[in-house]
């Protein structure tokens, strides 16, 4: 029973590590970086060109900018979770190696 729980926990950590690595590759990819920079600049430019009388447009642009940031933050969260998972897995391997090398 404990082995099954441990295996499930290890599998979850490995999934988090893999997702973190993929998210890291994605947010560093030139096409992704360019897309985010372009979208952000377009939104800001549209906001600057809007009039104070057009509150609906400004609100929509604000929401778009906010959501763009949320996507970036979500991916960064996966990267950080992956780093924590990697550290936890390394710690578990080190503990297991220490247990296996103990004299009887």
Image: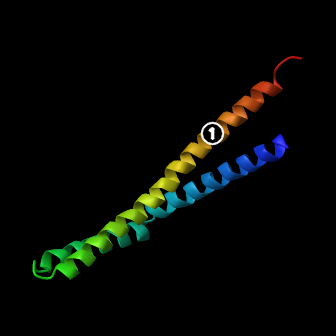
Q: What quarter of the picture does the N terminus occupy? A: top right
Residue 24 against residue 5 in the figure, above or below: below
The residue most toward the left is 52
Q: Is residue 34 left or right of residue 85?
A: left
Q: Residue sitting at 10 percent across and 80 percent down?
A: 51
- The residue wearing badge 1 is 88
Residue 51 visible in the shown view: yes
Query: 34 and 100: which one is in front?
Result: 100
Query: 30 and 35: which one is in front?
Result: 35
Q: Residue sitting at 55 percent across and 46 percent down?
A: 83
So how many labels did they put on this image? 1
Task: Pinpoint residue 101: horizontal percent, then vertical percent.
Answer: 81, 23
Task: Pinpoint residue 4: horizontal percent, then vertical percent.
Answer: 82, 47
> Splitting the image into 4 quarters, where does residue 100 fall?
top right
Q: Residue sitting at 72 percent across and 51 percent down?
A: 11
Q: What quarter of the picture does the C terminus occupy? A: top right
Q: How is the image coloured?
A: rainbow
Residue 42 visible in the shown view: no
Q: Is residue 38 left or right of residue 31?
A: left
Residue 26 against residue 49 in the figure, above or below: above
Q: Is residue 42 left or right of residue 17?
A: left
């Amino acid at each position: 029973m404990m082995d099954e729980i441990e295996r499930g926990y290890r599998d979850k950590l490995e999934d988090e590590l893999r997702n973190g690595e993929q998210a890291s590759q994605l947010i560093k990819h030139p096409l992704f970086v360019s897309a985010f920079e372009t979208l952000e600049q377009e939104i800001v430019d549209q906001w600057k060109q809007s009039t104070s009388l057009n509150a609906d447009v400004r609100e929509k642009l604000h929401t778009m900018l906010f959501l763009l940031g949320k996507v970036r933050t979500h991916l960064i969260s996966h990267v950080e979770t992956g780093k924590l998972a990697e550290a936890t897995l390394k710690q578990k391997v080190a503990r297991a190696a220490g247990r296996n090398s103990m004299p009887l």
